Image (cartoon, rainbow, N blue to C red):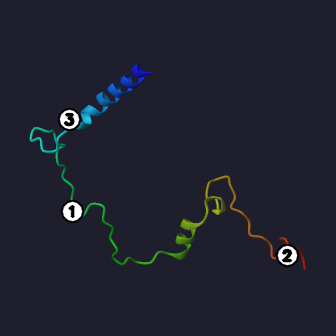
Amino acid sequence: MANKALTWLLLTLVSVSPVLARDPANPEASVPPARYSPIMSGTKSYRPVEPLPWGDVNRRVMPKDAQPSDAPGKAAPKAKDEKSGPHGKH
């Protein structure tokens, strides 16, 4: 039992020692190089823009499965007749 505890203690100290060896006051410590980053990087423009056609905006936010297909060979879904549907002809 004492051997297991001693082994565990030694392994813990060996694994922690590199962390303890790093001294922030060491002038010889390696430092990653500074990179240039433009001041305006990551900003978004909030300037006014011209309004988009409402049909295009609606198609952009429409769920993918509800969008009409423009692919050749596929017909767009037909509009339902007024008298058809869940309430039938009443």
Q: Which residue is mark 1?
A: 39
Q: Residue furthest right?
A: 90
The nearer-to-camera label among 1 and 3 is 3
39 on left or right of 26: right
83 on left or right of 30: right
Which three-letter amino acid code belongs to the residue tagged 1?
Ile
- Residue 28's x, y, as percent? 10, 38
Tell which circle, 1 or 3, labels the residue nearer the N-terminal end.
3
Q: Residue furthest left?
A: 27
- Residue 86's x, y, as percent? 85, 71
The CA span between labels 1 and 2 is 62 Å
Looking at the rendered structure, the secondary structure element under dot 1 is: loop
The CA span between labels 2 and 3 is 82 Å
Of 55 and 25, nearer the camera is: 25
Q: Which residue is mark 2?
A: 83
Is the Cβ of the residue at disc 1 closer than 8 Å to that at disc 2? no
The nearer-to-camera label among 1 and 2 is 1
Tell which circle, 1 or 2, labels the residue nearer the N-terminal end.
1
How packed mark 1 is, by other alpha carbons closer than 10 Å (few <14, some 14-19, many 20 or more), is: few
Residue 21: mark: 3
**Who's the residue at 53% across and 76% down the image?**
54
